[in-house]
Amino acid sequence: MELKGKIYNIDKLDEFIDSINRGEKTKVQIDIYNTKNNPAMYIIEFDGKLLSYSFTRPSNDDSKDILAEVNAEIVKASREENEDGIKYYLIDNSGIKTCFFNAPK
């Protein structure tokens, strides 16, 4: 997910990455608000081996939530900073690196 606008508590993502790399159970929730101030909630949990990712967001008519869930075996996480901002990655057991959060400067 890529964000535009103010970001709060980015240190929680750093703690989340550190916990994954230590093999500890951890959880983080990221809330993003649209122009109508409706939240999209991303919840990422790590049980020491398996990562669960789920999100809810408002539907087009704002009457229902759309739910989705993804599970993957994660072996490592990383944080990379450059002139554009900070990218957070999850690396699975096949070595595939996926950016799950992009925070612009």
Image: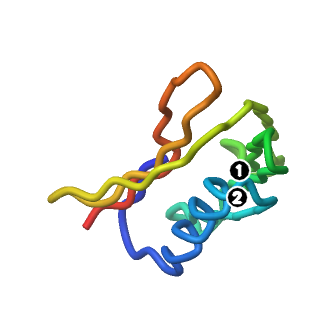
Res. 2 visible in picture: yes
Residue 97 is left or right of residue 46, and the answer is: left
Q: Earlier in the sequence, mark 1 or mark 2?
A: 2
Q: Considering only vertical position in the picture, is 40 above or below 65?
A: below
Q: Which residue is mark 1?
A: 57
**On the image, numbered disc 2 is attached to which residue?**
41
- Percent from the top left, x then y, of residue 64? 83, 47
Q: Relative to 92, does residue 33 appear above or below in the rendering? A: below
Task: Give the class, few, some or many, for how many residues have Cα within 10 Å of label 1's Cα (few <14, many ≥20).
Answer: many
Horizontally, residue 35 falls left or right of residue 38, namely: left
Mark 2 is surrounded, within 10 Å at the Cα level, by few (under 14), some (14 to 19) or many (20 or more) other residues, namely: some
Quadrant for the C terminus, please. Answer: bottom left
Q: Amino acid at mark 1?
A: Arg
Element type where label 1 sits in the image:
strand
Label 2 near label 1: C-beta < 8 Å?
A: yes
Residue depicted at 80% across the width and 39% down the height: 50
Q: Quadrant of residue 49?
A: top right
**For residue 65, side relative to residue 100 (left or right):** right
Task: Kindly report which numbered mark, 1 or 2, lies closer to the viewer in this rendering.
Answer: 2
Residue name at image x 49 percent, y 47 percent: 1
Who's the residue at 53% across and 24% down the image?
95
